[in-house]
Image (tube, rainbow, N blue to C red):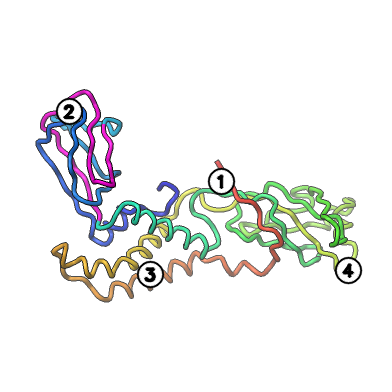
Amino acid sequence: MGGLYTTPFDVWDRTGRATRRQKTDVELTSGTVIQLEEHVLPSKLHILDDTGQEVDETNYEIDTDFNQLIYQDNDSISNATINYITAPASKDRSERGVKQATNFIDEHLDTTFNGLKRRVDEVYQTDGTDDARIMFMEQPVRDVEKVEINTNSNEDEPPEWEEIVEDVDWTQDGETGIKLNRSSSPTRSSLNKFYRNKLSQSIKQIRITYTYGFEELPADIQNLTEILLATDLFLDTVFGAGIDGRDGFNPQSPTQYRDKTEKIIEEWDREFYHNFSTLVVRGEEEDVE
């Protein structure tokens, strides 16, 4: 997916605006330039030699600015066939739309579907109870790598971070965050100090490094991305129908797509997990290899 939740081709194909084209009996020698139709999709261009074998893509390049194919291999091909697909808009414009839709979904659903992400040193303020639960900002939580507590109760001074022990002082709380286990560790002075005076106004802070997200893109999310873009492109589709020689556009389609969009977002929205913990410092984010 190239880091995105769909491709320009999938969107254009969904709206019936991807056009399949073919050139036959093409003579290819090194340096040959073949003019293609406008808005060619490079990933959907394939050359077959005169035996029907596909030509390796390293033997040619595609200039999307001028919609040209430049053959570069020293071995000539007679009677080649070029199969390719064109879109109704430029490659850059299409990719920009897919990226915007992907970012919208991430921000709206408070997660990422583009592989796992790591949040480093994210700080939360707890409610100060013995069995405090900290619900992380980004979910679903896959792995909690490190948990530290601020043992300095003076909020006017820099925090003093001390790491606490998994399965002794804390446990992962499903896919939402962690749960502190004070009762299981009565001898740990740092954790006791953390809870000592519940009536004080000191900020009880936890610093966490964790991973979240999805390793594989759910089909629902690719569908949602395409629906969002298809709905946005329907105006183009209406006006483009005459140009493309198509008719039969259903004016109810945008409403039907909007209903599907709302249903998918509702199913995947994790916003109800929020407000359990106060985010103090947003962690630095990095990809998980």
Mark 4–mark 2 Cα distance, whole angstroms, equals: 81 Å
Of circles 3 and 2, which is in front?
2
Label 2 belongs to which residue?
A: 29
Disc 3 vs disc 4: Cβ atoms closer than 8 Å? no
Q: In which quarter of the image is residue 59?
A: top left
Q: Which badge, 2 or 1, is on the more N-terminal residue? A: 2
Locate residue 233, reporting x and y percent: 31, 65
Q: Which badge, 4 or 1, is on the more N-terminal residue? A: 4
- Apparent side of residue 13 relative to residue 268 in the rendered image (left or right): left
Label 4 belongs to which residue?
A: 200
Mark 3–mark 1 Cα distance, whole angstroms, equals: 31 Å
Q: Which badge, 4 or 2, is on the more N-terminal residue? A: 2
* Badge 2: residue crowd in 10 Å (few <14, some 14–19, many ≥20): some
Of circles 4 and 2, which is in front?
2
Badge 3 amino acid? Lys
Residue 269 — which label? none
Disc 2 vs disc 1: Cβ atoms closer than 8 Å? no
Badge 1 amino acid? Asp
Residue at x 22% of width, y 23% of height: 74
Query: Can residue 34 be found in the magenta stretch?
Result: no
Residue at x 63% of width, y 61% of height: 137
Secondary structure under tag 3 reads helix
Label 1 belongs to which residue?
A: 287
Q: Which badge, 3 or 4, is on the more N-terminal residue? A: 4
* Badge 4: residue crowd in 10 Å (few <14, some 14–19, many ≥20): few
Badge 2 amino acid? Thr
Q: Give the range drawn in magenta.
A: 60-87
Q: Quadrant of residue 97?
A: bottom left
Label 3 belongs to which residue?
A: 260
Badge 4 amino acid? Ser
- Apparent side of residue 268 relative to residue 148 in the rendered image (left or right): left
